[in-house]
Image (tube, helix red, strand yellow):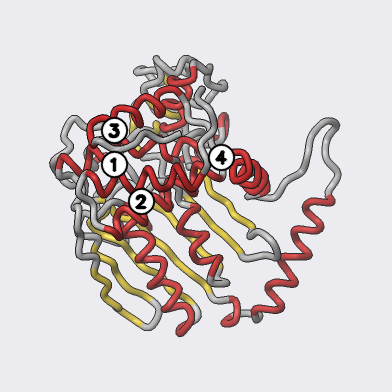
Amino acid sequence: MTSPVQADDLAQFCRTVLTGVGADHETARDCTASMMHGSIHGVDSHGVRLLGHYAKALQGGRLNKAPKVEFTRTRAGSGMVNGDNAQGARATYAAMDHACDLAAEAGVGAVGITNSSHFGPAGAYAMRAAERGMLALVTCNSDSFVRLHDGAERFHGTNPLSITCPAPGNPWLLDMATSAVPYNRVELYRSTGTTLPEGVASDSTGADTTDPHVAEMLAPLGGMFGFKGAGLGGVAEVLSAVLTGMKLSPDIAPMGGPDFSTPRGMGAFVMALDPAAFAGAEVVQAGVTRYLELLRASPAQPGREVMAPGDREWAVAQGRRENGITLDPVTAASFAELAHALGIDPVG
């Protein structure tokens, strides 16, 4: 592992690389913001380790370097964003901003996203809504990498779901793949030489494996009850692809290429809810505060700790903002190559 890098320095390096390969200001801003959300909060599989991938997709033409992201309002509380083949964060932050605007007026704002691409950590966009006092739901489908329950081939993508509710201090934040782990976690474990947990990945025949170098597909969330994870993956599929008219997971080109010149045509879905339109902002705040107090006070098993969704991330974020972020070896090597290729100062 390398020496820790301060978050501000890491963010500046990411923006410099993205603009260096031709991305416009908004794309560099939003792509960096989403990756930094991942790296700061310990979601390293969807953090700055993706910088090289996004740079390659921008250079190859898969991603539009200067997209014209367009919003069309369809009803009082709904609309569609055409991402114009933008990097996923660019389209999704825009969609969430529009969803919050709709919710402020109609109580609920739901926005489908078309012609987008990989958007990284779903929680980044849910947090955008929480910052505006809104509850939110975010989901996206992706290329097939997760077998069905008892299945022997890739079918769903990792199809994440993120839901948030504002709360005093930090919000209640659920951000999860509907697979047992995200595939980027497998790649991270390959980089660090770490053995995978049992029951999260399968080889080419669908049999379980703990070797990240042998893993060819992921298991759905739930282990013996993986039909639940497969069902949740279907929720993401319906909202992201069916509702928006975009591609189903089996029809999306692989994230890893080899084609980096053809846009992937991915869909996504975001929704914001204004608590003032329901029980009222003060009542909702009191309710979530009480809920979190009860949850965190609930007795834990010996040697364990009860946490609310997001608690681990807030603790990691505090430490990383103070002490910096350590890059895994593969990411550090990728950053060195990017700096050399673009003639910019290396990070760290």
Task: Classify residue 51 by image quadrant.
Answer: top left
Q: Marks 1 and 2: in contact by CB < 8 Å?
A: yes
Q: Helix, strand, or loop for circle 4?
A: loop
The residue wearing badge 4 is 42
Along the horizontal axis of the image, is 91 left or right of 206? left
Contact (Cβ within 8 Å) of mark 2 with mark 3: no
Dot 1 or dot 3, earlier in sequence: 1
Q: Of discs 3 and 4, which sits in the foreground? A: 3
- Between the residue at mark 3 and the residue at mark 4, the CA separation in whole angstroms equals 23 Å
Q: Nearer the viewer, residue 280 or 22?
A: 22
Crowding at dot 1, Cα within 10 Å, few <14 / some 14-19 / many 20+, comes out as many
CA gap between label 4 and label 2 equals 17 Å
Q: Which residue is mark 3?
A: 338
Instruction: Compute the Cα span from label 2 to label 3.
Output: 16 Å
Q: Amino acid at mark 2?
A: Cys
The spot of residue 154 in percent (x, y) is 34, 31
Q: Which residue is mark 2?
A: 31
Q: Position of residue 272 (x, y in %)?
A: 48, 69
How crowded pointer 4 is (Cα within 10 Å; few <14, some 14-19, many 20+) is rated as many
Is label 4 in contact with label 2 (beta carbons under 8 Å)? no
At a point 48% along the width and 51% down the height, the residue shown is: 161
In the image, residue 80 above or below residue 231? below
Q: Are marks 1 and 3 in contact (CB under 8 Å)?
A: no
Q: Which residue is mark 1?
A: 54
At mark 2, the secondary structure is helix
171, above or below 56, in the image:
below
Secondary structure of the residue carrying tag 3 is helix
Query: In the visual, does 164 lie left or right of 110?
Result: right
Instruction: Measure the alpha-carbon separation of dots 1 and 4.
Output: 20 Å
Q: Which residue: 25% across, 60% down?
A: 83
